[in-house]
Structures are given as structure tokens and as C-alpha cells.
Image (spheres, rainbow, N blue to C red):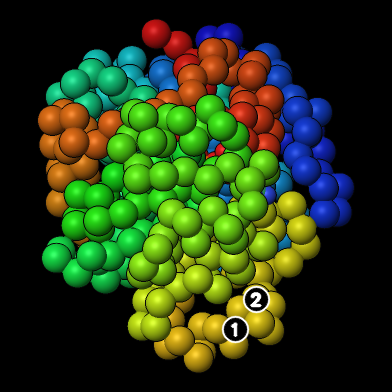
Amino acid sequence: RMQVQRVVLNSRPGNNGAPVPENFRLEDTTLAADLSDGEVLVRTLYLSVDPYMRCRMNEDTGADYLTPWQLSKCLDGGGVGVVESSHCSSYAVGDVVTSFNWPWQTHAVMKGSVLQKVNPQLVDGHLSYFLGAVGMTGLTALLGVRERGHVTKGANHTMVVSGAAGACGSIAGQIGKMDGCVRVVGICGSDEKCRALVEDLDFSAAINYRQEDVPARLKECCPDGVDVYFDNVGGVTSDTVISQMNSGSHVILCGQISQYNKDVPYPPPLTVETQEVLQRKNITRERFVVLNHMSKADAALCELSQCVKSGQIKVLETVVNGIGNMGEAFCSMMKGGNIGKQVIKISE
Ligand SMILES: NC(=O)c1ccc[n+]([C@@H]2O[C@H](COP(=O)([O-])OP(=O)(O)OC[C@H]3O[C@@H](n4cnc5c(N)ncnc54)[C@H](OP(=O)(O)O)[C@@H]3O)[C@@H](O)[C@H]2O)c1
């Protein structure tokens, strides 16, 4: 038997409420160390916290592809770790593996069938990148832009990204530049984030939506209007961006985090004014869900790996230590405490 720690759901956030660290509880438990056929024992290295988890905290997630987390049960999400013993022919001791359903636990017994083996060389040994730039959030950015953005080299496109200093947004803007946008403008929640976007990631400009006059600054930063909008946030910010979009332009509907603490279905309804703008200007705004494009994942991950290694894509991360800080890290990310991908380091 092995002593492990895990995080369970202690309570659900109140109606229309922001999550709080008290919604999570750390527990000591034991693992039976003997493995059945097809099982592996893994040691957790890094865990991911992501906005969609807010929906899993509700009894009804509001999305058909998301199951609710259960009270007092171990939570799960994206994770990366290393195989410590194996009764599954596909995995050997020392293999680095990932899963979308990794338990929030320091060690875990998992079925080989829910794991993917990954090559540490793809990330130059920086294994947390498998949860971010060379994982789900990188894929979301790359495939979102390619499948919905209609970015065309030589067309002088201007891209706007909201949630721009976050995991998906920071990569999406860099892909927009790489694919030929002449101007990429980020919208985010602090001056420090604005500086990182412009100085470190080469965004053309950045707007702090908490401090600045967003409509006026957008006009200034996007003199030729907006051709592509990578939308992570929804709400008032998105209404403003959409009102400045060109005819025949495209919204990449990636997420709507400004509405996730509210009891509304996804995607949340638009205002009548914004619906009218979309129609009048013939702007596309088709829902994008990365999980529906996984046939393109392998090629996309290869491309992301190469771009990260070459430095063409720069990676920002916010790393917190210790399984006891999972709940706090999640709540912090939901309030904008992160720059780049929020990950939690569980062990060396
Ligand atoms: N479609 C898909 O398949 C898919 C896959 C992955 C993620 N997503 C979506 O992509 C979006 C970003 O996810 P991520 O994992 O990259 O998270 P993230 O952007 O790294 O973190 C969330 C960020 O959202 C911002 N935020 C929080 N409340 C906000 C509000 N009321 N208004 C504006 N911004 C707010 C905060 O930054 P500020 O400081 O700027 O406020 C925070 O840092 C989310 O909407 C998520 O649901 C979609």
C-alpha cells in the first residue's frame, strides 16, 4: 500500500458564483500497489487547471461533452506524469504519459487505454508544455485559427485576440502573425500582461480592458478594422470588438469565460445589437470545439513543437507548486492571476 494525496470536490460554487478554494479539499488516502492486467502506476508531474472545469463544478455542466465532477470524489483533468510500474504492454517504466482524465492525485493507478505516450524531445524536456503550448491549449489556438479564421497571407488582415495573455490567447496571436496577419492586437486584464504581449510575444498592440477605453483604443490600434477575432471571453468586450469588424470577417468562437460563473447555456445568447451586426456584415461565428478536430492533432502538435523549439512561438507559463494548491490555482486562473498557461507542479 502506498500513501498518496488527492483533491476532491468539497462543495459546488453558489448559483452565479465565482469558485473559491474552499470548494476543493485535500485528502490523504492509500493506493493498492498491485496492478491488474492493462494497468500502470504513474507518478504525477504536472496537472492542468482550465476554464471548462468551472462547468464541471456544476451539477449540470450545460455541455453535452462534459460530465459533472462528483462531491467528495477525486477530481480529474489534463495531466502529465511518468510510469513507475506497468502491467500494460504499451508502457515501460520511465515512459512519459499524458491524459485528459488524469486524477488530481500524487500517484495513480490508471488503465493504459486512457494514456498517451509522449516524446519528451518534442518539448526539449519541458514536460509541462504537453499541457499547454504542445498540448490542448496549443491545439486549440492553432486549429481554431486554421479552421475558423480564414487568415490569408498578403491580405493585410488585422486579428484581435481577447483573453490574449492566457494559454490559448497568447499562442493564437502568435499563430495569427505567423500565418500572415499584418496586425495582431491583444485585449487582456492588466498592464503587466499588455507589456508581455507587446514586448515578449511581438503583438502589435495590447489593450487593458479593466483600465482603458476599449472602443477608442481598438479604433486607434485597428485603423483598417478587424478581419479575424479570436474570442476567448464573450460579453461586453466581444460586443465591442464585433461592432468594429469588417464585412465578411470571421469570429473564432473559442470560449466565453466572462459568462462561466453565470447560469447560462453555452454559447451564451448574444445581444440583439450584436446579432444584428453579425447579420448585416455577413460575419461568420461558428462554434469551435477542439475535440471535434482531433484527426488533425498529431500533425498540429508536430508543428507546435517545431515552432516552440525554433523560438517562433514563445511560451508563457504560470507554475504553482504542490497538489495542495490546485484549488487556489484554479480560482486564481479564473480571475486572471495567470500569464500564459496555468499549471501545477506536483513532483519532480
Ligand atoms: N473551444 C475549445 O475547444 C477550447 C479549448 C480550450 C479552451 N477554450 C476556451 O478558451 C478560453 C481561454 O482558455 P485558457 O485555457 O487559455 O485560459 P486562460 O486564458 O489561460 O485563463 C483564463 C483567463 O481569462 C481571463 N478572464 C477571466 N474572467 C474574465 C472576464 N470576466 N472577462 C475577460 N477575461 C476574463 C483572465 O485573464 P484577464 O486578466 O485578461 O482577465 C484569465 O487569465 C476559455 O474561454 C476556454 O473555455 C476553448
Three-letter code for the amino acid on which mark 1 is drawn = Gln
From the viewer's perspective, tell me whether residue 220 is left or right of residue 178.
Answer: right
Question: Which quarter of the rendering shows the N terminus?
Answer: top right
Q: Few, some or many C-alpha atoms within 10 Å of disc 1 (few <14, some 14-19, many ≥20)?
A: some
Task: Report if residue 78 is visible in the image.
Answer: no
Q: Residue at x 67, y 42 (%)?
A: 211
- In the structure shown, which secondary structural element does the residue marked by tag 2 occupy? loop
Q: Is mark 2 within 8 Å of ligand 1?
A: no
Q: CA distance from mark 1 to mark 2?
A: 6 Å
204 up-or-down from 246: above or below: above
257 and 205: which one is in front? 205
- Percent x, y for residue 276? 59, 87
- Which quarter of the picture shows residue 305? top left
Q: Residue at x 70, y 47 (%)?
A: 57
Question: Residue 38: which numbered mark, if any?
Answer: none
Question: Which quarter of the rendering shows the C terminus?
Answer: top left
Q: What residue is pinned by disc 2?
A: 270
- The reply to whether callout 1 and callout 2 are in contact (CB within 8 Å) is yes
User: Tag 2 or tag 1, which sits nearer the N-term?
Assistant: 2
Q: What residue is pinned by disc 1?
A: 275
From the viewer's perspective, tell me whether residue 186 is left or right of residue 334.
Answer: left
Three-letter code for the amino acid on which mark 2 is drawn = Leu
129 and 7: which one is in front? 129
- Percent x, y for residue 5? 61, 16
Q: Few, some or many C-alpha atoms within 10 Å of disc 2 (few <14, some 14-19, many ≥20)?
A: some
258 and 197: which one is in front? 197
